[in-house]
Image (cartoon, helix red, strand yellow):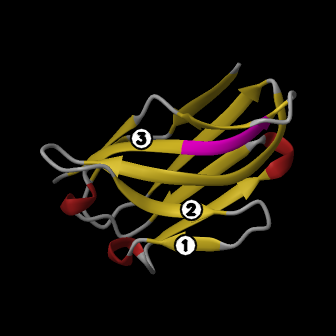
Amino acid sequence: QVQLVESGGGLVQPGGSLRLSCAASGSIFSINGMGWHRQAPGKQRELVAAITSGGSTNYADSVKGRFTISRDNAKNTVYLQMNSLIPEDTAVYYCNALVVVTSRREYDYWGQGTQVTVSS
């Protein structure tokens, strides 16, 4: 079994910054892609940013230049640095990881979500 635990959400004023973390633990052999997604009230969940095991990244157009995704493979952790936050970034943020478990099978695991609210 594998668990993803997110942290770092909260309330921030427009123009502020937050850093989200997501740590994976359990029966992990290796982790391939990792990503951050978000879901605002009344909207579908959308991909925010993704990163491969080799460090290649991909971003939604709405966050390019403001958000940075990174990972620490030794800690099985992915981060999302969010700068210049705007009210439209308000959402529940979820991380996911494509985990190869000890049986060498790959599964897509998700975190429980962390609330980010951008408001004055």
* Marks 3 and 1, the one that precedes in the sequence: 3
Q: Which residue is mark 3?
A: 9
Badge 2 crowding class, 10 Å Cα cut-off, few under 14, some 14 to 19, many 20 or more, is: many
Q: Amino acid at mark 2?
A: Ala
Using the image as rendered, state which of residue 98 and residue 118 is in the foreground.
Answer: 98
Residue occupying the point 43% across, 78% down: 64
Q: What distance separates the C-alpha of mark 2 from that of mark 1?
A: 5 Å
User: Dividing the picture into quarters, in which one does residue 86 lie?
Assistant: bottom left
Q: What distance separates the C-alpha of mark 3 from that of mark 1?
A: 21 Å
* Marks 2 and 1, the one that precedes in the sequence: 2
Q: Amino acid at mark 1?
A: Asn
Q: Which residue is mark 1?
A: 58
- Under circle 1, the secondary element is strand
* Marks 2 and 3, the one that precedes in the sequence: 3
Q: Is residue 33 above or below residue 49?
A: above
**Quarter placement of the C terminus:** bottom left
Q: Amino acid at mark 3?
A: Gly
Residue occupying the point 24% across, 50% down: 44
Q: Marks 2 and 1: CB-CB under 8 Å?
A: yes
In this picture, which residue range is highlighted in magenta?
96-100
Q: Is residue 98 magenta?
A: yes
**Quarter placement of the N terminus:** top right
**Disc ID at residue 50:** 2
